[in-house]
Image (spheres, rainbow, N blue to C red):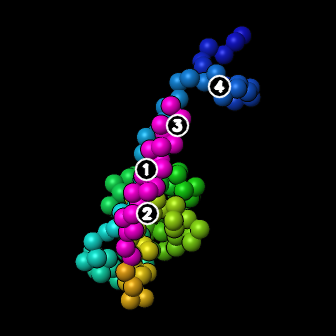
Amino acid sequence: MANPTPFPSAGGSQPPSTISNQRQIPILGEARQPSLVPCDLIGRCADEHEAVLICVHLSKLSNETICSALGIDKGHWSRMMQGRASLPSRKRLELMRLCGNLAPIQFEAMQAGLTVSVDAKALRKSELLAELAQLEAA
C-alpha cells in the first residue's frame, strides 16, 4: 500500500524536490546586519556571559530557534544561559549574526579599552551589492 502523505516514510526515500509542503522560517532565511548595542547597556555587563545574555534577549528569538540554528544541544544551551557553560568560540559570530547585534564583541572591546564602530560606507556598499545581486537574479 502506498504512503498517502507527501512526506517520505521512515524507511523510504523521496527526492526533496517532490516535497512541496515545507515552510521556511523567515528569520533564519534572511541575513541580518548586526547592529551596535548602546554602550551604557554593555557597560553594565559584569562578564562575557552577561553580554551573551543581552545579545540573546535583544534578538527576541526563542531559545529553541537559536539552538537549532547554531546546532547547539538544548542541554548545553540551558547550562550556557545559567552561566555553567560557555558559548563555543566558533559559534560567537554566528550567534551575533543570528541575533542581529554585537553585544559580546562590544563587551570584549570595552574590556580592552576599545570601541566598535560601523563603517557606514562599507555597510552601504554591501547593501547595494546585495541589492544588485537580487536584481541580476530576477
Circles 2 and 4 in contact, beta carbons < 8 Å: no
Q: Nearer the viewer, residue 81 or 119?
A: 119
3D distance between C-alphas at marks 4 and 1: 32 Å
Give the residue at x 48% y 74%: 84
The residue that mark 3 highlights is 136
The residue that mark 1 highlights is 128
Give SS at disc 3: helix
Of the image marks 4 and 1, the number of the one nearer the N terminus = 4
3D distance between C-alphas at marks 3 and 2: 21 Å
Q: Residues within 10 Å of mark 3 (few under 14, many from 20)?
A: few
The percent position of residue 124, horizontal first and vertical second, equals 39, 57
The residue that mark 2 highlights is 122
Q: Which of 11 and 55 is in front in this view?
A: 55
Kind of residue indicated by mark 4: Ser
Circles 4 and 1 in contact, beta carbons < 8 Å: no
Q: Answer whether residue 129 is magenta in the image.
A: yes
Give the residue at x 60% y 19%: 6
Please state the extent of the stretch shown in magenta in the rendering: 116-138
Of the image marks 3 and 2, the number of the one nearer the N terminus = 2
Kind of residue indicated by mark 3: Glu
